[in-house]
Amino acid sequence: MPLMPKRVKFRKSMRGKMRGNATRGNTVAFGEYGLMALEHCWLPGRTLEACRVAVAHFLRREGRLFIRVHPNKPISAKPLEVRMGSGKGEPEYWAAVIKPGTILFEIAGIDEATAKRCLARVAHKLPIKCRFVTRKHAAV
Amino acid sequence: MSTPVSIKAEKRQALGSRANARLRKTGLVPAVIYGHKQEVQPLQLNKKELVSHLNHGSHVFNLQIGDKTESVLLKEVQYDPFGQEVLHVDFARVDLNERVTLTVAIELKGDPKGEKEGGVLQQILNELEIECVVTEIPDVIAVDVSNLGKDEQLHVSDIKLGGSIRVLTDPDLVVAKVEEVLEQIETPVEGASEPEVIGAEKKEDAEAASAETQK
């Protein structure tokens, strides 16, 4: 079951823009290592689920995964072979709006080499370029 | 202990964001030094040299500005949105016998015995606020977790620091714990292909009521 909100105020939303870099959620906050997005995209809930499964299979109950983004934007689409007009299409899937710099996943409880290999598998499932990052401490 | 690291710096004449952007392209980092009721002095440092010291967790520096040397404490480092490039550094003038308050990173050492019992080590607190003499500032606070069993926690009060170091962080806070991570099994809820719309029911009720009154 892909991730999606439990309750929403409106069924459909406008497309919006994805300008600029992430100013929030751009630091490794929970785990030791993370995967940072370097491009912007709409990340569907089913992609996040595929990433979660990939990590679960790789870690085999070791370590801990934190998913830092949530698909809270409804993406609507018109059915095939339908003429334009007649209102907005029905919600097709839910997506997270990703901006460059967003930390998508974090991992804790495993060594750096294993975390790197694990997050490389995750990066293969994503439609954007990503970077492996480690936590930054204190003032530095 | 953090021994002061010597690093060369030059006075910076050109100020402003555009001048600083040009400076960064030449491999230098803009910095500023302030404190002790003296003048604020804009500086420029070699980026490569500075980053290597930052990666080692150095806090205290001896800045060689021309023929003058000043002892300074690292106050703030600004990074780009991706957290990779150093954009600017703040230094505060300090006396080496002065007591200062700062945050230092916690580094967990050893493999906890609880991991062999199926637990996963989780670090909850990553930095500690301490007060100490400038010459006694540790680069990192190394904490041994090898005796931590499954479902056990390590608190701030368990960390023993020598010398004049005083911990300011709440002693009851958990630094690390070893616990079993239970995999969340999400069961699909019936009819949950779409989220509930807040206020949708009220609207339907109101419409039904208005239809009845019209009749």
Image (cartoon, rainbow, N blue to C red):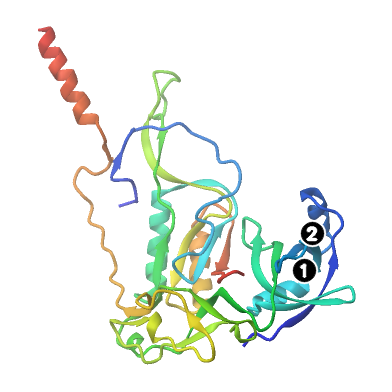
**Label ID, residue B170:** none
Vertical side of A110 occupied by A105: above or below: above
* Residue A113 visible to an observer of this rendering: no
Closest to the observer, B180 or B83: B83
Q: Which residue is mark 2?
A: B24
**Nearest to N terminus: mark 2 or mark 1:** 2
What is the three-letter code of the residue carrying label 2?
Arg
Indicate the quadrant containing the C terminus of chain B: top left, top right, bottom left or bottom right.
top left
Query: Could you say whether the residue bearing mark 2 is in a helix, strand or loop?
Result: helix
Q: Which residue is mark 1?
A: B47
Indicate the quadrant containing the N terminus of chain B: top left, top right, bottom left or bottom right.
bottom right
Q: Position of residue B208 (x, y in %)?
A: 14, 19
Residue at x-position 56% and y-position 51%: A23
Chain hosting mark 2: B
> Taking B51 as reference, is A93 left or right?
left
What is the three-letter code of the residue carrying label 1?
Lys
Q: Position of residue B190 (x, y in %)?
A: 18, 46
Residue at x-position 53% and y-position 77%: B105
Q: Position of residue B183 (x, y in %)?
A: 29, 68
> Taking B194 as reference, is A59 left or right?
right
Measure the alpha-carbon separation of dots 2 and 1.
8 Å
- Tag 2 near tag 1, CB within 8 Å: yes
> Taking B115 as reference, is A111 left or right?
right
> Taking B162 as reference, is B38 left or right?
right
